[in-house]
Amino acid sequence: MVDEHGDQQGFKKMDPTLYLKNKKHFGVNFQPCDDQIHVLVVVPKEIAHHRYKPRDSSKEWLTELFTKRVEFHSLPFVGSLSSYTAQSLPVKIRAKKKWLVKWNLSPELQEKIFVIDDAAPCKEFKGLIFGKRALKRFRCGRTESSYHIVWDFVIRNVLDHIFSRARIDRDSDIGSVTRKKRPDFFFILNDVCVFRGEESSPDVSIDVPTAELCSNLEWEYGSVPYVFGYAASGFNVDLLALHRDDDKIVTKTHIGSFNFEVTEDVFRTVLAILNLSLLFPAIVEACPASGKC
């Protein structure tokens, strides 16, 4: 605190011609020189014990991210979705340096997703997606249901955080445009199912849920170029674009393959889903009434 003259209150002013030479104030290794001035600052205990707490910038980051949403006329060609989902985030997640050191990602992958910000990291997003529980190795059984927690931590949690008002469900008979058979997992944004999943136990080939993504979907999306889905067999997950071929038959285009037992693949999946999420609003807005749930 200073008074109206700019002088500090509660302190004695030091003679500027003096300097400190008492080693007790600076430690036994202190060696003063005649041409140096040394200042000893005593910090009050209440200030010394106060630890700076970085602020959480998760909401700020999310708001900025969606200023980068892709408009319908700029949606990437289906054949380029693989490279699109692997590109750097347009707004990177703010992370503490110690987090990145602990995760030990490849420099290329780290640079695509994160920017160092110790003062305002995305603490909420980190805790939900990259926390200890999310990145620990899961011990799952042989059944499909025992892997729900794995798929949810990596896929559902990201979607739920990004689109807090969306509807997400699993093994439900309602809420999907699928007429033949509902998917195992579905994500509905503004009454449009833009992302779905077919899941299986690890003893079932991933080709089975991949085929189900197409065979169980009747196209009700009009001129929308594609929607998205994933096929899962245990820890192995494929991201796919679902669309119609020249004969109007629902088919798929492979976007990426991931192994959720591999930490870097978990981060790669999050990167892919975040990039895909920027396409969802345009797809939803272009969807006709026939494609709404």
Image: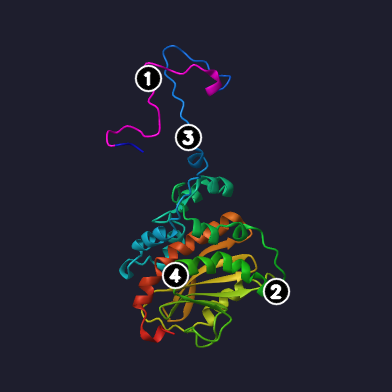
Dot 2 or dot 4: first in sequence order is 2
Q: Mark 3 points at which residue?
A: 43
Q: Mark 4 points at which residue?
A: 163
Q: How far apart are labels 1 and 3 at the CA level? A: 20 Å
| Amino acid type of the residue tagged 2 in the rendering | Thr
Residue 104 falls within the magenta-colored stretch: no
Q: Do the residues labelled 2 and 4 touch (CB within 8 Å)?
A: no
Q: Mark 1 points at which residue?
A: 15
Question: Around disc 4, counting alpha carbons within 10 Å, would you say few (fewer than 14), some (14 to 19), or many (20 or more)?
Answer: some
Q: How far apart are labels 1 and 2 at the CA level? A: 79 Å
Q: Name the residue under label 2.
A: 143
Dot 1 or dot 2: first in sequence order is 1
Question: Around disc 3, counting alpha carbons within 10 Å, would you say few (fewer than 14), some (14 to 19), or many (20 or more)?
Answer: few
Residue 150: which quarter of the image?
bottom right
Q: Are marks 3 and 4 in contact (CB under 8 Å)?
A: no
- The stretch of residues the image draws in magenta is 4-25
Dot 4 or dot 1: first in sequence order is 1
Quarter of the image that includes the C terminus: bottom left
Q: Is residue 115 above or below residue 61?
A: above
Q: In this view, does 39 lie above or below 176?
A: above
Q: Position of residue 108 (x, y in %)?
A: 49, 48
Q: Position of residue 274 (x, y in %)?
A: 45, 62
Q: Position of residue 185 (x, y in %)?
A: 55, 76
Q: Is mark 1 on a helix, strand or loop?
A: loop
Q: Residue at x 37, y 85 (%)?
A: 289
- Residue 254 in view of the camera: no
Dot 2 or dot 3: first in sequence order is 3
- Mark nearest the camera among 3 and 4 is 3
